[in-house]
Image (cartoon, helix red, strand yellow):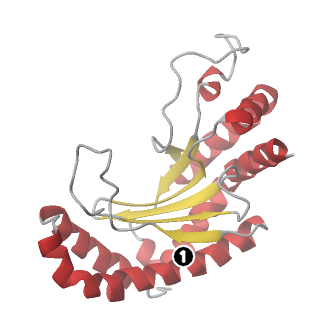
Amino acid sequence: MADGFEALIGEANAFFAELKKNNSKDWFEPRKDHYTDRIKKPAELLADVMGDELGRITGSSFKPKLFRIYRDVRFSKDKTPYNTHLHLSWFPPEGEARPGWFFGSAPDYLLLGCGVPGLKGADLTRFRAAIDRDGAALQASLTEAGRTCGAELSGWGAEPLKRVPKPYDEGHPNAELLKRKSLVLHADLPQDWAKAGLIAALRARAEAMLPVWRWLDEAMRTAMV
């Protein structure tokens, strides 16, 4: 059953398609109220509703976030001022060292993801220790998520290392996972997602990726001890 959020996706796709062709303050400012009323506010409601759903699925609590439409162009060669996509995230209140969930919508994609977009210091060290200790279980969960919902590892987050980090051997059975400084999995929503409604489609994808989230959550909880 449709839940009303299909209207949000339609509005957002149409708006961002035009914004991509006219990415300027002159185009955006006269349409700012339209963006706020028809996209931003419904997206904030989606973030709250889906945050509750993820809480029920995982048994954890999450802080929803709507990413700003304004780009940070200070260190970018691309000086276009606005993002041309709708992105949400949900992380536990403890912070982003634990795995979170991600939603992305644009004219050319609609997806849900989960994982840790960046690790460093003690968190990265213990993440690698968990892979060394139980990487086979993580790999099995990744494979199963790929089989059940087409989930795949995302390029979002820090770039992997070119070599296996010390003290691990280059021939380690989980060498490719050890090279990672982030691990984010994402899955496209099915083409007929609107029949069941956006929340139901996202919940189904979250349930399929839940073993990966649980493995990461356990690894990061250990890292926080």
Q: Is residue 144 above or below residue 120?
A: below
The furthest residue to the front: 74
87 sits to left or right of 37: right
80 sits to left or right of 8: left
Q: Residue 213 at x, y = what percent?
A: 69, 52
- Residue at point 29%, 45% (across, down): 76
Displayed quadrant of residue 121: top right
Mark 1: few/some/many CA within 10 Å (<14, 14-19, 20+): many
Q: Helix, strand or loop at disc 1?
A: helix
Q: Residue 35 at x, y = what percent?
A: 30, 81
Displayed quadrant of residue 125: top right
Q: Is residue 132 above or below residue 204?
A: above
Q: Which residue is mark 1?
A: 47
Q: Is residue 176 visible?
A: yes
Q: Inspect the image, locate mark 1, and give the three-letter code of the amino acid beneath it.
A: Ala
Q: Residue 222 at x, y = what percent?
A: 84, 44
- Residue at point 55%, 47% (across, down): 185
Q: Nearer the viewer, residue 11 or 224?
A: 224
- Name the quadrant of the C terminus: top right
Q: Is residue 218 above or below residue 120?
A: below
